[in-house]
Image (tube, rainbow, N blue to C red):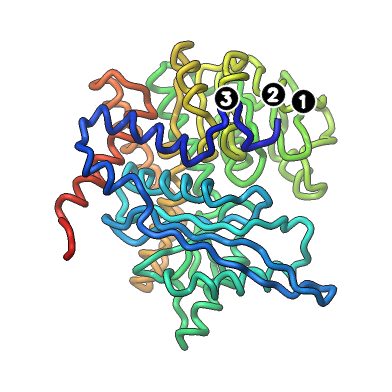
Amino acid sequence: MTVGTLVNEKNPYELAMQNFEMAADVLGLEADIRAMVRAPERVLAVTVPVRMDNGKVTCFEGYRVQHNTSRGPAKGGIRFHPGVTLEEVKALATWMTWKCAVMDIPFGGGKGGVTCNPKEMSITEIEHLTRRYTSAILPIIGPGQDIPAPDVYTNSQIMAWIMDTYSMTRGYLVPGVVTGKPICLGGSLGRNEATGRGVFYTIESACQHLKLPLKGAKVTVQGFGNAGSVSAHLLDGAQADVVAVSDSRGAIYNNQGLHIPKLMLHKEKTGSVVGFSGAEEISPEELLALECDILVPAALENIIHGENARSVRTKIVAEAANGPLTPEADAILEDKGTFVIPDILCNGGGVTVSYFEWVQNEQHLRWDLHEVNSRLERIMKNSFSEVLETKLQRKVSMRTAANVIGIARVVEANKSRGLYP
């Protein structure tokens, strides 16, 4: 089954709206308030012409969506991926709004993307694509308007090109226009590991709540990119047994636990987890069905859906990815008693440290790694406690509880600001 192809034939934005309506019903929101906070404030679609290395010009489609800025500037990543669609970007921007509110940081939700395959492009072509896309979205981004960050197949170098393009048009350095930059250009220490570290902190909190010892817990990680590898490394350091991992090329398994530091080196050298010594290859479907204590979906959205959710056998699902479960899968896992740490809570570490980076840029400060990680741990664990308390009080799922908190904070900000004119 191709990622993003759903058995229920709903696109990601429809799924985001379905989760929104569930939480809005719990809150008892009036129709006019729902209308104000559910739809994106601004949707920009651009054509991105790029002169390729062969001298020919290829036009790519790009998007930037600002979902809600009532609590602060839009914040959200930019992805370069062949599966990027406007509906996906709208969904991701929506989730970013609730995520920033759940973390209680003063940002709204944004997201961007270009439909392309960077794996088939040279570094020069990617730079040209980045700068041209930045020029196209330039009117709506800025430190006080909309602050992009890395996402799927984008990185600190791409953020440096975005910052440079923006700064050259302004005539002076503007480091706060993006986060996830290289350290030498105002990036924050701890940013690269922030999402995975946040996943680890929420798993720690979930295990404490469920009285499940982390030491010796069996873990599977679907998606061994940045978030997946960092969370696997930290779980391995806490003496959990990471028994299976996967990436876009395949999956590997060792019931006694994989040697994660060596696996990270193997992935760095070969570009994949496949072929790692001491592990057997399994299918991605088999990985999701393995019996374990903790499953970490850390790839793209809609990986677990109505057709395969019943085969998932785990105590905890920690959503390191955005939207890896469909609402149908949510209902199935809830009935099974699976404890789901929803994406807008679980992977909130990335945007939280992005906020730290922005604060440091705006105030011309530099925090050390201990300060960054201690602030992150406090925010992640406080947010987890708030969501868990809401879940228990309202007798709803963790996802609905997180959405209730996030949406309520956005609604409060909208009501307080009122309507202009």
Find numbered disc 1 in the image and state the secondary structure of the residue it sits on: loop
Circle on res. 305: 3
* The image quarter in which residue 102 lies: top left
Disc on the earlier residue, 3 or 2: 2
Which residue is disc 1 drawn over?
Answer: 283
Which sits in the foreground, 42 or 117?
A: 42
- Kindly state the secondary structure of the residue where label 3 is placed: loop
Relative side of 198 to 157, left or right: left
In the rendered image, is residue 354 in sight?
no
| Mark with earlier residue (3, 1) | 1
Q: Residue at x 80, y 49 (%)?
A: 269
In the displayed structure, 32 sits above or below 333; it is: below
Residue 339 image-quadrant placement: top left
Q: In this view of the protein, which residue sits in the foreground, 61 or 54?
A: 61
Pick the front one: 47 or 76:
47
Q: Which residue is outermost to the top?
A: 336
Identify the residue position indicated by label 2 in the image. 287
- Identify which amino acid the numbered label 2 is placed on: Leu
